[in-house]
């Protein structure tokens, strides 16, 4: 397989931006347009990149995933419910609400994602949410019920379908607003993302099948997938340290600058969809 610099760069962008609260959708769209990257291979290539970063989440949280699965299934017969029982139901509720909100917004998101103003506005909105995090950190120790927490995080993840809105930023912030500790909000945000990202990937796959069923991939796609996986693993661990230290919200300043640049920049990019 031949090496292609353009696809490799996109793999780098996916691996780094997928887990940071900066919206990988906007970054991928800008880079794709700067590199004049486009064509029928985009859908399948995006699928491969997202599968790489989902694999990162699964491997990183493999012990938590096993614990949740075992706790959820054992909860049907055990009198004493383990934490996995509640986590399992929370993830199910988050996924359902994400679908209820995200699917109707999907077509709208695809239409407005062609506008630099829309993507810029999404980044500015993300910056606003991140700016609220230090104000709503769990200083009082008050925690909302697991059901209300799941509903709010599901709403946040559904809204993140919109271009420029960071999924990780929205869900981690929502968890913190609901009284979760920093480490718990980080963990739950990415655990809850697995069904949502896999569901979105399935929809894209069905779209490919509907369009003709032929999977077309760009040159060097395997190298891009590998670098997305490696950088994703490093970035996820880096993000965990930032969240626990309370310094991750400063990415809001970056989103604010990037959003204003897109809104006032002279270049008129044509954006595509892709969430993080």
Image: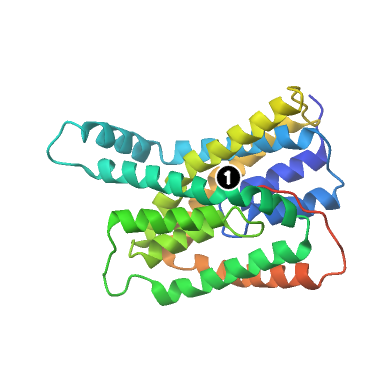
Q: Quadrant of residue 245?
A: bottom left
Identity of the residue furthest to the left in this view: 79
Question: Height in image: 62 above or below 21?
Answer: above
Q: Secondary structure at mark 1?
A: helix
Place of residue 6 in the rendered image (x, y in percent of width and height, measured from the top left) = 81, 42
Residue drawn at x 40%, y 36% is 62
Image: 15 above or below 114? above
| Residue 8 percent coordinates (x, y) | 75, 40
Quadrant hosting residue 118:
bottom right
The residue closer to the viewer here, 100 or 147, is 100
- Relative to residue 43, is residue 2 drawn left or right? right
* Residue 69 in the figure: left or right of residue 110: left
Q: In which quadrant is the N terminus drawn?
A: top right
Residue at (45% x, 49% y) in the render: 97
**Quarter location, residue 128:** bottom right
Percent position of residue 131, x then y: 52, 74
The answer to whether 224 is drawn above or below residue 190 in the figure is above
Depicted 119 relative to depicted 219: above or below: below
Measured as percent of width and height from the top left, residue 274 is found at: 66, 47
Judge left or right: residue 39 versus residue 119: right
Coloration mode: rainbow
Residue marked by disc 1: 232
Label 1 environment density (alpha carbons within 10 Å; few <14, some 14–19, many ≥20) = many
Q: Residue at x 26, y 41 (%)?
A: 85
Residue furthest toward the bottom? 135
Q: Is residue 135 visible?
A: yes
Count the marks: how many?
1
Is residue 254 visible in the rendered image? The answer is: no
At x 58%, y 39%, the residue is 200
């Amino acid at each position: 397989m031949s090496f292609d610099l353009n696809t490799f760069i996109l793999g780098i962008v996916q691996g780094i931006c997928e887990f940071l609260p900066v919206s990988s959708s906007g970054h991928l769209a800008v880079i794709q347009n700067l590199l004049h990257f486009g064509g029928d291979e985009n859908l399948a290539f995006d699928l491969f990149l997202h599968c790489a970063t989902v694999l990162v989440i699964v491997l990183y949280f493999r012990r938590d995933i096993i614990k949740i699965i075992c706790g959820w299934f054992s909860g049907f017969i055990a009198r004493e419910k383990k934490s996995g029982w509640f986590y399992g139901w929370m993830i199910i509720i988050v996924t359902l609400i994400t679908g209820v909100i995200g699917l109707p917004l999907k077509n709208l998101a695809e239409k407005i994602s062609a506008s630099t103003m829309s993507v810029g506005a999404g980044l500015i909105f993300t910056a606003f949410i991140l700016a609220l995090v230090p104000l709503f950190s769990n200083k009082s120790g008050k925690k909302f019920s697991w059901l209300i927490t799941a509903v709010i995080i599901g709403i946040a993840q559904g809204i993140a379908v919109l271009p420029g809105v960071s999924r990780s930023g929205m869900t981690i912030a929502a968890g913190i607003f609901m009284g979760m500790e920093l480490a718990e909000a980080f963990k739950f945000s990415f655990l809850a993302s697995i069904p949502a990202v896999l569901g979105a990937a399935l929809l894209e796959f069905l779209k490919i099948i509907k369009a003709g069923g032929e999977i077309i991939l760009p040159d060097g796609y395997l190298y891009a997938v590998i670098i997305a996986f490696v950088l994703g693993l490093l970035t996820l661990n880096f993000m965990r340290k930032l969240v626990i230290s309370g310094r991750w919200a400063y990415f809001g300043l970056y989103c604010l600058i990037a959003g204003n640049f897109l809104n006032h920049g002279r270049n008129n990019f044509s954006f595509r969809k892709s969430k993080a």
